[in-house]
Each structure stands twice: as structure tokens, then as C-alpha cells.
Image: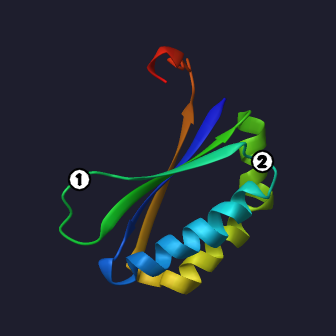
Amino acid sequence: MYIYNVTVNIASSVEKQWLLWMQEKHIPEVLNTGKFSEAKMSQVMVDEEEGVTYSIQYTTDSKETLDRYYAEDAPKLRQEGLQLFGDKLLAFRTELKVIKHVINYAQS
């Protein structure tokens, strides 16, 4: 299992608009590529001089599937965010290979 992590710093002036776009349009479009099984969106809890930082983690089955996403879908999906938010958005991406995944059912 792999996690495709996108960390985004968004300007406070467009944060609400960006959050709405992410939740209602962008994340569903990424999931609709069929290459990811789930997505989690989290706010990064750090003090920022400017803007607010978020992490969006998409889970996929393999590196090969992730590479197909990069080749087939990512350019188009990234372009819309750049068009809408331009220099008010700064993003970087990381790939995480899951070594072990444990669920504690006793805590439910």
C-alpha cells in the first residue's frame, strides 16, 4: 500500500474557497480516477506566518498505480488548482510506502 501525500499551504484570504473546492470537486475527481481507495484531509497543526497548511493523503495499492496517476491524470487535475488559486497556493508532494498498518478495534 502507498500513500500519495499532498501538503498545501493556502493563503488565508482564499482558504474557505479552496476548502470548498477541495472537498466538493478536487478530492472527488482524484478518487474518480479509480486509482485511489480513500482520501484523508487534515490540517497541519503548526504556527504559520502566512496561510494555513493542510495534508491530503490518498491511498493506493501500488507504486505502479501511482505512476499511472502521474502520467494519466495528475497534470490536468493540478492545472485547475493553479488556475483558481495561483500564487496563493504552495504545494509539495511525497510518496509514502506503508510498512505496517494496525487498527486498534479495542478503542472503538
Mark linked to residue 46: 1
Which of pointers 2 and 1 lies earlier in the amino acid sequence?
Answer: 2
Question: Which residue corresponds to mark 2?
Answer: 35
Instruction: Point out residue 37 in the picture as x, y percentages from the top left corner.
Output: 72, 42
Give me the residue at 71% from left, 44% from top.
Answer: 66
Could you tell me if the residues under marks 2 and 1 are in contact, i.e. CB atoms within 8 Å? no
Instruction: Point out residue 12 in the picture as x, y percentages from the top left corner.
Output: 31, 77
Q: Residue furthest top?
A: 106
Give me the residue at 43% from left, 74% from top.
Answer: 89
Left or right, residue 53 beside residue 42: left
Give me the residue at 48% from left, 75% from top.
Answer: 18
Mark 2 vs mark 1, CA separation in Å: 31 Å
> What is the three-letter code of the residue carrying label 2?
Lys
Quarter of the figure with the N terminus = top right
The kind of secondary structure element at disc 1 is: loop
Of residues 105 and 90, the one drawn nearer to the viewer in this rendering: 105
Q: Is the residue 35 above or below the residue 82 in the image?
A: above
Of residues 43 and 9, the one drawn nearer to the viewer in this rendering: 43
> What is the three-letter code of the residue carrying label 1?
Val
Left or right, residue 47 beside residue 2: left
Instruction: Point out residue 28 in the picture as x, y percentages from the top left corner.
Output: 69, 62
Q: Is the residue 107 above or below the residue 3 in the image?
A: above
